[in-house]
C-alpha cells in the first residue's frame, strides 16, 4: 500500500492536504484551551479520563464538578439537524467519445446528526443524510457547433457517515472531520436535450441491471461551531464525500468505473444533553 | 496530549490518503470504429473486436436476456484453440465452422437488423451470418414457404388474372418495385398498392428516366390521387409483404396523408454512452402531417385501411403496418412480421451505437442504432408485429390474406 502514497499528492486528494495544513495552523495557536492551560499549569492537576495522579488521589474531582468548572462537554451527547447545498461531480473515463464531458451539478443535503464527545478535543459523529449527487453529461461535436446531448442527472442517496470529530479552540471551535460513509442510491431523474429532440425532457431514472446502488467511501471536512448556550451548538461545515464504490457493477471486461465526488456546505444546530 | 492528538491525526490522514488512492481507473473503452482495432491477426483477436464492438454499440441490451459476459468467457477459449491449431500445423477452420461459432456468439441477440460479415484472418474467406434471418426461417409458419419478390409478383399477377384485382401496372425504380391496382366492389373502388421497399420520398422528388421508373412514380401518384380524391373510395390496401423496408419518413406519405393530426406512434432511444445501458431518454416518433398538402381523414370518413404482412415484411414495412394497426379504421391481415424495428440512421457517429467495422476489412457488423418502442405494444424487436387477423401463407398461400382484406373492406 505504501507505493500508493505519492498519488496522495494529486489534486483530488486536496482535502488531505487541507487537513494537514489546518493541523499545522492549529499548532501555532498560543493556547489550546483555557481548561487545558489550567490543567497544564497545575491549577486543576487532573485531566479527567487520563489522570496523572489517579482518580482516587487527593486531587480527584468529580466528573460533574470538573465539567462545570471548565466548560467542558466531554462525555456528553449532542443531537441535531444539518443541511445545506451539495456539489457533485462524477469521475469517469470518457472512452473514445472525446467530445463527451462531465461537469458538476448542484443539489442539496439534509438529515440528522448525532455526536458523542469522548473528550473536549475528540468526538464520534454519525449522521443520517439525504444527499443529492447531481451531475451533467454533455457531448458537443465541433462540426455541429451545438450540443448533441445535454443531460442533467439528479440522484438521490441516503447515506450514513461515521466520523471522528477533532475539535480545537474555545469560544469558536474548529472541527476537522475524518471518517467513512455507507449509503444507498435511492433513485433519480434526468433532464435531457438531444440534437434529435431539442425540447427539454424530464423523466425518472430507470435502474438497470448494471447499476450498483450501494455507495461507500471516505468522508472528510472542516467546520466551525459556537455554543451560544450550554445546551446549543451551532455550526457550519464543508465536507467531501469521496466515493470508492463504482456506480456500475463489476464486469469481467470493459470495466466501466464511475465514481461520485460530493462536496457539501452545510449549517447545523445541535442540542447538547 | 497535543502531541498524541497530532500523531493520531497524522495516522488518519495517511490511512485516508492510502485508501483514497485505491480507486483505480476503469478499462479504456474500445472504439469499434478505430482502424487500430481492425489490425488483429488472430481468431481470438477478431472475436474480441466483435464482442467488444457489440458490447458498446448494440442497442438492445435492455431487451435482451443474453449473458454477454458469459459469451465472452465461453467462446474466447474456443477461438484461441483455432489460433493454436493454426500455429501448430497451419490448419484454418472452414467457413461453416466459423459461421457456426459466430452463430453461437450472436444467435440469442434480438436485433433482427444484425448482419455479421467476418473474413478469415488467414485465408480471407468471407462468412456472413444473420441471426434474425435464421430465427425467422425457423418459425413454424415460415418453414417450407417462399418469400421472394418473384413469389409475391407472380401472386399479384394471379390476382389480376383471377379477378381479385381489376388491373394494374408494375413499376421499378432502382431496387424498389411497386404495383398499383384497383378493385371495384359494389360500384366503389378499393385502392391497392404493393411496395418492395420504402424510398418514396426520395423517388418522388426525381423524374423517372426509363419507362419502368416513370411507371413507378406514376403508380404512387395514382394511388395517392385515388385515395385522396375519390369520393366513392371503399378502402385502401397497402401490401407490405416481402417488403425489405427503407426510410421511415415515408410514413408521412403512406400514413400522414390519411390522418388529420400528427400521430405519436412510437418512442425511440439511442445510447448516449459506451455502457450497455447508457440510453438517451425516449424520444417521441411522430407521423408528420405538416408537409402533406392533400390529406384525407380516413377515420372521419370511416374508410378502412388494411395492411398486408408476412414474415418477410421487414423494418419500415413493419413500422408502417404497426401504424396502420393503430388507426381507428386500420387493420393488419397476414402473418407476424420479421421483427426488425430498430432503425439504422445517419446519427451513428453521434451516439454509441449502430454498425461498426469495415466492409472491406476483416469484420463488419450491421446493427440497429436505436430502439423502437411502439406506443401500444412496446418493444417488439425480434418478435414482430402481430396481425389483427392472422392468415398464414402455409394455409392459404399469398391469396388468402388478399381475399380476407377485400372481404373486410366490403363488409366494413
Image: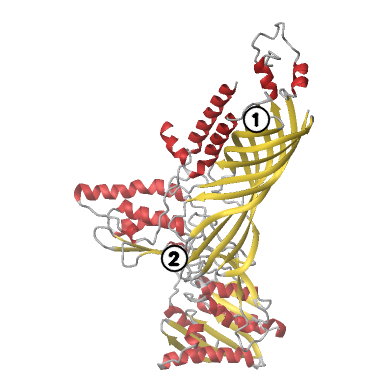
Q: What residue is shown at x 67% (from left), y 14% (from top)?
A: A42
Q: Quadrant of residue A7?
A: top left
| Residue B105 relative to residue A258: left or right | left
Q: Position of residue B412 (x, y in %)?
A: 69, 82
- Left or right, B412 with respect to B245, comes to right
Residue B389 at x, y = what percent? 61, 72
Q: Is residue B366 above or below residue B240?
A: above
Q: CA distance from mark 1 to mark 2?
A: 71 Å
- Chain hosting mark 1: A
Q: Residue furthest left?
A: B89
Residue B412 visible in the shown view: no
Q: Secondary structure at mark 1?
A: strand
A134 to the left or right of B78: right
Residue B341 picture location, percent across and down: 52, 68
Residue positioned 59% across, 62% down in the render: B281
Colouring style: secondary structure
User: Label 2: few (<14), some or many (≥20) within 10 Å?
Assistant: some
Q: Nearer the viewer, mark 1 or mark 2?
A: 1
Looking at the image, do the residues carrying marks 1 and 2 touch, with CB atoms under 8 Å apart?
Answer: no
Q: Nearer the viewer, residue A204 or B306?
A: A204
Residue B121 seen: yes
What residue is disc 1 on?
Answer: A167
Q: What's the chain of the residue with tag 2?
A: B
Residue shown at 45% from the left, 74% from the top: B147
Question: Mark 2 = which residue?
Answer: B133
Amino acid at each position: 500500500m505504501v507505493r500508493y502514497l505519492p498519488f496522495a499528492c494529486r489534486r483530488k486528494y486536496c482535502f488531505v492536504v487541507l487537513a494537514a495544513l489546518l493541523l499545522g495552523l492549529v499548532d501555532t495557536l498560543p493556547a489550546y484551551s483555557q481548561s487545558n492551560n489550567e490543567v497544564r499549569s497545575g491549577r486543576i492537576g487532573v485531566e479527567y479520563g487520563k489522570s496523572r495522579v489517579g482518580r482516587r488521589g487527593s486531587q480527584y474531582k468529580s466528573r460533574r464538578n470538573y465539567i462545570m468548572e471548565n466548560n467542558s462537554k466531554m462525555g456528553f451527547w449532542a443531537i441535531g439537524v444539518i443541511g445545506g447545498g451539495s456539489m457533485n461531480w462524477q469521475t469517469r473515463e470518457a472512452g473514445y467519445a472525446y467530445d463527451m464531458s462531465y461537469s458538476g451539478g448542484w443539489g442539496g443535503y439534509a438529515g440528522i446528526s448525532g455526536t458523542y464527545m469522548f473528550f473536549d478535543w475528540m468526538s464520534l459523529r454519525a449522521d443520517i443524510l439525504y444527499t443529492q449527487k447531481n451531475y451533467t453529461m454533455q457531448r458537443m461535436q465541433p462540426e455541429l457547433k451545438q450540443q448533441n446531448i445535454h443531460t442533467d442527472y439528479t440522484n438521490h442517496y441516503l447515506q450514513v457517515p461515521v466520523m471522528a470529530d477533532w475539535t480545537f479552540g474555545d469560544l469558536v471551535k474548529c472541527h476537522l472531520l475524518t471518517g467513512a460513509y455507507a449509503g444507498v442510491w435511492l433513485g433519480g431523474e434526468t433532464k435531457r436535450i438531444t440534437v434529435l429532440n431539442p425540447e427539454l425532457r424530464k423523466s425518472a431514472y430507470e435502474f438497470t441491471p448494471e447499476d450498483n446502488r450501494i455507495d461507500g467511501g471516505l468522508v472528510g471536512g472542516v467546520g466551525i461551531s459556537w455554543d451560544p448556550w450550554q445546551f446549543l451548538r451551532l455550526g457550519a461545515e464543508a465536507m467531501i464525500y469521496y466515493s470508492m464504490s463504482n456506480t456500475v457493477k463489476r464486469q469481467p471486461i470493459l470495466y466501466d468505473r464511475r465514481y461520485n465526488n460530493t462536496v457539501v456546505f452545510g449549517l447545523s444546530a445541535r442540542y447538547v444533553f | 496530549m497535543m502531541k498524541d492528538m497530532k500523531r493520531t491525526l497524522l495516522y488518519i490522514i495517511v490511512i485516508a490518503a492510502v485508501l483514497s488512492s485505491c480507486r483505480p481507473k476503469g478499462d479504456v473503452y474500445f472504439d469499434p470504429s478505430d482502424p487500430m482495432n481492425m489490425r488483429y491477426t488472430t481468431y481470438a483477436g477478431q472475436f474480441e473486436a466483435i464482442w467488444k464492438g457489440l458490447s458498446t454499440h448494440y442497442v438492445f441490451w435492455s431487451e435482451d436476456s443474453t449473458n454477454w459476459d458469459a459469451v465472452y468467457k465461453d467462446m474466447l477459449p474456443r477461438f484461441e484453440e483455432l489460433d493454436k491449431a493454426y500455429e501448430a500445423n497451419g490448419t484454418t477452420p472452414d467457413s461453416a465452422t466459423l459461421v457456426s461459432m459466430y452463430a453461437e456468439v450472436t444467435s440469442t441477440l434480438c436485433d433482427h437488423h444484425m448482419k455479421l460479415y467476418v473474413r478469415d484472418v488467414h485465408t480471407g474467406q468471407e462468412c456472413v451470418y444473420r441471426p434474425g434471418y435464421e430465427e425467422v426461417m425457423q418459425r413454424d409458419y415460415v418453414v417450407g414457404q417462399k418469400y421472394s419478390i418473384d413469389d409475391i409478383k407472380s401472386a399479384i399477377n394471379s390476382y389480376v388474372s383471377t379477378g381479385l384485382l381489376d388491373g394494374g401496372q408494375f413499376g421499378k425504380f432502382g431496387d424498389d418495385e411497386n404495383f398499383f391496382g384497383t378493385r371495384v366492389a359494389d360500384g366503389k373502388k378499393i385502392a391497392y398498392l404493393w411496395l418492395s421497399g420504402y424510398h418514396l420520398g426520395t423517388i418522388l422528388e426525381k423524374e423517372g428516366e426509363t419507362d419502368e421508373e416513370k411507371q413507378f412514380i406514376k403508380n404512387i401518384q395514382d394511388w395517392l390521387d385515388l385515395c385522396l380524391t375519390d369520393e366513392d373510395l371503399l378502402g385502401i390496401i397497402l401490401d407490405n409483404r416481402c417488403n425489405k423496408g427503407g426510410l421511415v419518413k415515408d410514413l408521412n406519405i403512406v400514413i400522414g396523408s390519411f390522418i388529420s393530426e400528427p400521430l405519436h406512434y412510437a418512442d425511440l432511444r439511442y445510447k448516449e454512452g459506451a455502457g450497455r445501458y447508457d440510453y438517451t431518454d425516449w424520444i417521441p416518433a411522430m407521423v408528420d402531417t405538416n408537409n402533406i398538402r392533400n390529406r384525407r381523414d380516413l377515420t372521419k370518413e370511416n374508410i378502412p385501411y388494411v395492411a398486408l404482412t408476412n414474415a418477410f415484411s421487414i423494418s419500415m414495412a413493419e413500422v408502417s403496418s404497426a401504424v396502420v394497426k393503430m388507426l381507428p379504421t386500420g387493420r393488419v391481415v397476414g402473418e407476424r412480421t420479421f421483427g426488425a424495428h430498430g432503425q439504422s440512421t445517419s446519427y451513428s457517429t453521434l451516439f454509441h451505437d449502430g454498425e461498426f467495422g469495415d466492409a472491406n476489412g476483416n469484420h463488419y457488423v450491421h446493427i440497429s442504432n436505436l430502439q423502437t418502442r411502439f406506443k401500444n405494444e412496446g418493444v417488439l424487436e425480434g418478435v414482430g408485429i402481430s396481425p389483427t387477423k392472422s392468415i398464414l401463407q402455409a394455409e392459404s398461400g399469398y391469396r388468402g390474406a388478399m381475399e380476407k382484406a377485400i372481404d373486410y373492406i366490403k363488409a366494413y
